[in-house]
Amino acid sequence: MGHALKWWQTIKISWSNHTAYRMNFFLQVIGPALVFFFVKYNLWSSIYSDESVEIIKGYTLSQMIDYHVWAMIVGLLAKGHSALNLSEDIRLGRISNFLIYPFNFWEFHTASFLSFQILQTIIVSISICIFWSLGILSIPSASILMSGFLYCLFVSCFWYTLQYLTGLVGFWLEETWILRVILEILTAFLSGAIIPLELYPKWFVSILEWTPFPYLTYFPIKTFMGQNSELIASYSVVTIWIIIFCFINHIIWKRGIKLYTGAGM
Amino acid sequence: MKKTVIYSQKLEKKFTSYKKEPGLLGSLKSLFVRNYITKKAVKDFNLDIKQGEIIGLLGPNGAGKTTLMKMFTGIVVPSEGTLKILGYTPSERDRLFRKKIALVMGQKSQLWWDIPAMDSFLLLQRFYEIEESQFQKRIKTMSELLDVDDLLHIHVRKLSLGERMKMELMASLIHSPEIIFLDEPTIGLDLISQENIRNFIKEYHQKNKCTIIVTSHYMADVQALCERLVLIFDGEKTFDGPLSKFETILGKEKNVTFNFSSPQDPTLDLWSSFEAQWDSHKIQVDLRIPEDKLRSVALNIIKDFPVTEFNTEKMPIERVMKTLMKNPQIVKQLNGNNGPHELNGRN
């Protein structure tokens, strides 16, 4: 009980922190996603405006737009969290406080992630309503919508463990942003966030399925579109990846903390 | 016999870093060739601190005080040696251990900037699992003592440094720790705030009988709070003993300052025998007079010269510290002459 209260209070505090600078938060989270969507919308509209093109790899224009709206939603919901501050906190010695509190650093960080996810869920729900009312997005049934949300939240946990790992590298590297940029770009291309995976060669996609990437965007989109027939397999694969990354993070933390100098204190 | 709460034996911490030449070229070079330097921040450090003591940990910047504090609190892992705090090994960071200690860093905030201090306290209440009635009682007592009851609900970023420091203290003491580590708790504060913080710590210690380790560059802090001093130079312990002993390690002479109504002749024999130091107008002189001659010499000077004011030094510790910092080799000489046992009042 005492432990649950710790988590709850931390989630509340993080919530206040996330929302302390509302405008900044909005611009940081929503801004880039909207701009990216706008570019893709125009790009695909002009490709499909060629009269000879009606269907590309099974996608009509409206399906393609649907795909990209969902890509944006998934981006916000499953991959919104960033551990940008983590490596900086390590480098500048700001995690010292958390080493002293009887609440572990990963617990604090995870609670903060959870509160971020609650906030994202609200933002995404509003976004879906807006897109739907503008007629850009066709809404599936409530059960499919719910299934999509749940799967995205599960994937977000995996994304979180991955982000956490890039943050922990801060024990060794002075700058870790380049790692995150590489990860972002790779994920954008390999997860289906830029173009649907159907557009890649088949052999390439079958290799990709062995990596975590398609599970970060492509499968969540398909779930939202009601086209993920392998939902259980998708959950299982993500579960395995979560376990693997939790294990790696645990080891990396144990080694890294020995190098920690608590600089600047 | 009081129980030992901090015990270290041959404690050592090494830091490894590499030299980097400036500029882009230097950065590129450092990718391939790195000249690693290992620095021992703390060497062969033995310490035994009993429950309820207030210890001043002194030394110049970079001497290793903060590294010691970080090892004591489990933030950094020692490279060698034994360290036990309340029977725990700090670097294992046992939850129970963490509930029994507190660290206050004058240069670093542990409160959340964007929320009122009270919200941080509530979070800490959960972290330390403090019962509601206890929590309310402690907040009330401490906020009254520190006179901050009306600031509890103001965003921390809007508080002044002095006000924030008081909140930091409250945050660290909310769980009634058994050992409190204070790393420069009065740094950057004005004189009144410094005094308030000192008084608070003193009162808190008297009431709670906790053990306190404090580092500070303000000798007034040390004078007011500490009964025992541990001096650290270049990672090594060079003195460990009562404050009164530290004040006299450079000799038992008293420093006395005389002011005169008119300029005096500094060449008289009288002055030279007491290491006189004159100001440029020759109307003020500092003398070092052996304790047993103090009365007679002072009386003679008052009788023979137009003395307008005279006083003995208020904080001999400040002079001792300054002298040692300017000439660190003195410490070694003292240790060499007297043997470390003589100087280290306790080992």
Image: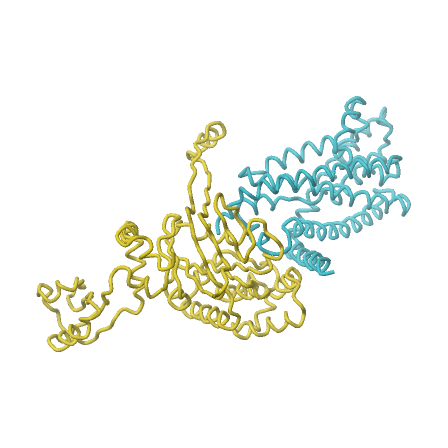
Among the 4 quarters of the image, the one containing residue A252: top right
Q: Nearer the viewer, residue B242 or A85?
A: B242
Q: Position of residue B179 (x, y in %)?
A: 52, 62
Q: Residue furthest front?
A: B1
Chain A rendering hue: cyan
Say whether residue B313 is left or right of residue A67.
left
Q: Residue at x 89, y 35 (%)?
A: A229
Q: Which chain is yellow?
A: B
Q: Residue at x 55, y 75 (%)?
A: B144
Q: Nearer the viewer, residue A247 or A192?
A: A247
Q: Nearer the viewer, residue B334 or B168?
A: B334
Q: Position of residue A188 (x, y in %)?
A: 71, 34
Q: How many marks?
A: 0
Coloration of the structure image: by chain
Among the 4 quarters of the image, the one containing residue A250: top right
Q: Residue at x 85, y 24 (%)?
A: A52
